């Protein structure tokens, strides 16, 4: 990409305010945090409910960015850069992408549907890449922002595009169609995702079909509703009947009719009819979703007129698609980012941004295979890769593959190996320690072997943390706030059991205003891990005050005794304006200054320059209980009264905050200057209506260690609390009460999920194991087991055990490995 900025004025209908008569841009960005922003970056300052990128323009100018698309020019930026001023920067981004797409003329496959888009895209890339230079959406970049960013990555060497488009409500697809302009359309499975955005299924299908408005071909699975919608769509758009390329298990009028599918040995044999001929096809999957996705790919290959032998050869090599970047603990205090199934230039840029946002250690390493399908010559490609590596301040590069090895001189800090086997043979000499390591390689290099070598060895029970869901939940609650209200997020108790440092890094990436922890050691751990956000310590002990000062934490002060103790140390250290947070007791009666102590508090603070009141806060006792909402209102009134008195008497104007998660939802008029988000970040609400909008964050998984069949009359576990009344198949799972599973969840009260089916927990939960009844489930040793997540939810478990979700989450032992993914 090399575009004259002035040429975009009519495209975006923009007003120009600039420094230079001609400036060229070769990179588009919407993320002010990316280290890839530079002098030839065109930055689109997106503005939404949760953030306004205009606030970071001055800082970007200082870093060398010269060109911006904005809705207004901030006062401190005038005369310092080139600006294209538009009404809506998101619309401008989409218009720019549509303009850029029209510069290229080659086949483009557009995919939409509820499920399977990303998998079909990745499989089509694998199946077609031997014959085409493919550009495709990275990961799941299918949104109103993701689609334009995907299309903008096209270059002159590409000759086939594969882009997915996702929508959540009406009138969104028309924007994406103008950007993708698919010549071939693929409609994947239509399911229940985003149902709330549409009146009914027909409206949902009709909206998705808008992507294919000018497509020469539409691939889809026949069924009555889709056929009716397509017939109307074809008529409305005056398309020819032959553009419809269908398949079916039941309708013989389909273009491809599936006569039979038979699963055996983890594979499926498919017999199908096409143009009055019969063919057999083998794919390496048994589940219905994979079979449907594979058939969609088959139809695209048939349309491209591939011969049967090629189709069979390539489709039997299909593989499970890794759709996420995972963060794992590694050996020798390393942190690993696992992206070991993908190697292309665009996804490398995304992975490097993720590395920066999740780095645990200052030292950064990238293990990189040969890169395929870039569209550039090798000389140009590895020059660009080397520049990316330099921009992202990577400390060392380990290149694996003959091609990257031959261009090692372009990197200032590279060690290269011809193959993964050579790397493994030299593993010990590489001395991995105290590094954040991005592992990124094409599937053929089998980098999963490298991940296994570097990964910290723990037992096979893991808690998977979905960082995307945390971002979603954070933005959901941000959307409830007035524009000037700050957000403190609680990451105490090891991030409610989910992992404190990694979540804190994500929150810092999202530019929240404050983090909250319970004790000083939690804050010290975050600061030691590189967190720069201000951190409030809610329950500081006086013995921790020196450490709090040393690590620049901010203590909550809740008593005269504690205030005097802190002032004594602060004076000894000659502190000035050290930030503290004053806690008022408005009815919780746990910690805080009560009304009768306010005068003494004011007298102690008056004229004091050693500390500064950063905020005044209180804690609601019943913000989640409608029966006690009047008590909450009385707390809010008292907080207003006492905090106002403090502010008036002391002549200060600190941040004020009283709302917790349920308070944010139930008492919007009491947001003051800041709110404190806790359990809601982790996808839990006591409001069933609100719960629908939150996403599950943590999924606790294990495996089946052993399966046995016991006869009627035999018992299971300590105390013989389960007695088999018939022949029963029992599976043992390596997780127990030492991992955080309550013993009350045993003895057929609770269950786990195996192969999408409930399996009752039988007998007592042991320290390190529990046993389940799998008599009706076709399972084997090594199969995955879901302890909690989408089903059962932590709320369901908490209700059954007569406790709260907080206890379930925070009980998960730290010996359970946390795996973070995006």
Image (spheres, rainbow, N blue to C red):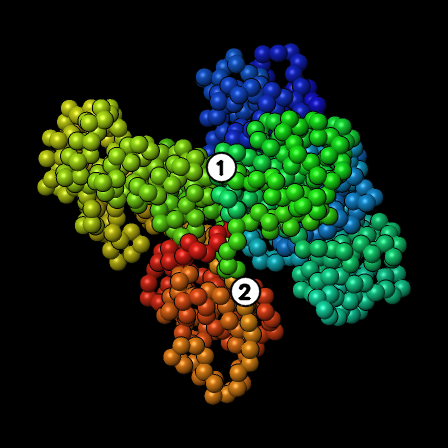
Q: Residue at 37% of width from left, 58% of height from top?
A: 811
Relative placement, left or right, of 341 versus 742 is right
Quarter residue 388 falls in: top right
Mark nearer the N terminus (2 vs 1): 1
Relative placement, left or right, of 521 versus 224 is left
Relative placement, left or right, of 582 versus 87 is left
Q: Residue at 11% of width from left, 30% of height from top?
A: 603
List x then y, in percent, for residue 214: 75, 43
Is the residue 219 above or below the residue 21 in the image? below
Quarter residue 514 falls in: top left
| Residue 342 in view | no
Q: Crowding at label 2, few (<14), some or many (≥20) Cα neighbours within 10 Å?
A: many
List x then y, in percent, for residue 703: 54, 64
The kind of secondary structure element at disc 2 is strand
Residue located beneath label 2 in the image:
703
Q: Count of labels shown?
A: 2
List x then y, in percent, for residue 129: 78, 44
Is the residue 232 above or below the residue 85 in the image? below
Residue located beneath label 1 in the image:
361
Which label number is shown at residue 608? none
Q: Residue at 37% of width from left, 69% of height from top?
A: 743
The alpha-carbon separation of the residues under discs 2 and 1 comes to 31 Å
Task: Name the image quarter holding the N terminus.
Answer: top right
Is the residue 222 above or below the residue 561 in the image? below
Relative placement, left or right, of 239 versus 667 is right
Q: Crowding at label 1, few (<14), some or many (≥20) Cα neighbours within 10 Å?
A: some
Q: Tags 2 and 1 in contact by the CB under 8 Å rule? A: no
Q: Residue at 79% of width from left, 52% of height from top?
A: 300
**Foreground: 336 or 419?**
419
List x then y, in percent, for residue 454: 57, 47
The kind of secondary structure element at disc 1 is loop
């Amino acid at each position: 990409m090399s575009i004259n900025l002035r040429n975009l004025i009519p495209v975006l209908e923009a007003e120009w305010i600039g420094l230079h008569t001609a400036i060229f841009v070769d990179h588009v960005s919407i993320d002010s945090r990316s280290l890839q922003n530079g002098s030839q970056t065109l930055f689109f300052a997106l503005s939404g409910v949760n953030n306004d990128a205009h606030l970071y323009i001055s800082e970007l100018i200082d870093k060398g960015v010269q060109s911006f698309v904005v809705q207004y020019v901030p006062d401190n930026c005038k005369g310092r850069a080139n600006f294209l001023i538009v009404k809506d920067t998101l619309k401008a981004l989409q218009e720019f992408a549509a303009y850029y797409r029209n510069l290229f003329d080659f086949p483009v496959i557009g995919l939409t549907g509820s499920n399977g888009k990303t998998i079909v895209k990745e499989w089509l890339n694998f199946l077609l890449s031997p014959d085409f230079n493919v550009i495709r959406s990275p990961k799941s970049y299918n949104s109103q922002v993701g689609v334009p960013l995907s299309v903008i990555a096209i270059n002159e060497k590409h000759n086939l595009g594969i882009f997915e488009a996702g929508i959540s409500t009406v009138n969104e697809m028309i924007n994406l169609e103008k950007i993708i302009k698919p010549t071939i359309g693929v409609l994947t499975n239509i399911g229940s995702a985003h149902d709330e955005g549409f009146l009914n299924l027909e409206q949902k299908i009709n909206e998705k079909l808008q992507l294919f408005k000018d497509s020469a071909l539409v691939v889809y699975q026949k069924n009555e509703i889709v056929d009716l919608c397509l017939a109307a769509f074809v008529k409305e758009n005056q398309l020819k009947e032959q553009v419809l390329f269908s398949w079916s298990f039941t309708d013989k009028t389909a273009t491809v009719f599936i006569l039979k599918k038979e699963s055996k040995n983890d594979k499926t044999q498919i017999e199908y009819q096409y143009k009055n001929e019969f063919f057999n096809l083998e794919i390496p999957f048994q589940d219905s979703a994979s079979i449907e996705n594979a058939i969609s790919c088959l139809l695209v290959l048939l349309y491209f007129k591939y011969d049967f032998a090629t189709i069979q050869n390539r489709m039997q090599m299909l593989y499970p698609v890794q759709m996420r970047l995972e963060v794992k603990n590694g050996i020798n205090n390393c942190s690993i980012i696992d992206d070991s199934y993908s190697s292309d230039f665009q996804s490398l840029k995304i992975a490097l941004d993720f590395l920066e946002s999740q780095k645990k250690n200052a030292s950064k390493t990238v293990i990189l295979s040969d890169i395929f399908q870039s569209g550039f010559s090798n000389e140009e490609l590895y020059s660009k890769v080397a520049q990316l590596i330099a921009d992202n301040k990577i400390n060392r590069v380990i290149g694996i593959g003959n091609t990257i090895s031959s261009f090692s001189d372009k990197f200032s800090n590279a060690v290269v190996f011809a193959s993964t086997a050579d790397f493994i043979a030299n593993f010990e000499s590489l001395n991995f320690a105290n590094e954040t390591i991005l592992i990124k390689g094409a599937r053929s290099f089998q980098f999963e072997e490298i991940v296994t070598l570097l990964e910290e060895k723990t037992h096979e029970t893991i808690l998977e943390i979905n960082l995307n869901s945390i971002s979603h939940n954070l933005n959901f609650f941000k959307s409830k706030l007035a524009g000037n209200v700050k957000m403190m997020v609680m990451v105490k108790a090891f991030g409610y059991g989910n992992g404190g440092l990694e979540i804190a890094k994500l929150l810092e990436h999202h530019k929240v205003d404050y983090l909250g922890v319970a004790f000083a050691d939690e804050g010290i751990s975050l600061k030691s891990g590189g967190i720069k956000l201000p951190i409030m310590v809610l329950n500081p002990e006086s013995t921790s005050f020196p450490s709090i000062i040393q690590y620049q934490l901010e203590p909550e002060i809740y008593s005269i005794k504690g205030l005097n103790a802190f002032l004594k140390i602060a004076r000894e250290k000659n502190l000035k304006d050290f930030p503290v947070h004053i806690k008022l007791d408005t009815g919780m009666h746990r910690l805080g200054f009560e009304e009768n102590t306010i005068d003494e508090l004011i007298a102690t603070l008056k004229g004091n320059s050693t500390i500064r009141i950063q905020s005044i806060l209180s804690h609601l006792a019943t913000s989640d209980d409608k029966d006690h909402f009047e008590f909450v209102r009385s707390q809010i009134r008292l907080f207003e009264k006492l905090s106002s008195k403090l502010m008036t008497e002391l002549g200060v104007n600190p941040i004020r905050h009283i709302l917790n998660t349920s308070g944010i939802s139930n008492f919007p008029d009491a947001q003051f200057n800041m709110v404190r988000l806790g359990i809601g970040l982790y996808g839990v609400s006591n409001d069933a209506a609100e719960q629908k909008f939150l996403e599950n964050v943590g999924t606790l998984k294990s495996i089946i260690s052993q399966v046995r069949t016991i006869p009627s009359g035999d018992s299971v576990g300590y105390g013989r609390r389960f007695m088999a009344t018939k022949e029963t198949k029992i599976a043992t799972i390596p997780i127990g009460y030492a991992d955080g599973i309550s013993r009350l969840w045993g003895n057929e009260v609770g269950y786990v999920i195996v192969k999408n089916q409930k399996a009752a927990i039988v007998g007592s939960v042991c320290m390190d194991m529990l046993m389940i009844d799998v008599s009706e489930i076709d399972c084997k040793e090594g199969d995955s087991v879901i302890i909690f997540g989408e089903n059962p939810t932590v709320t369901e478990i908490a209700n059954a055990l007569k406790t709260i979700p907080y206890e379930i989450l925070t009980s998960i032992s730290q010996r359970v490995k946390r795996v973070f993914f995006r």
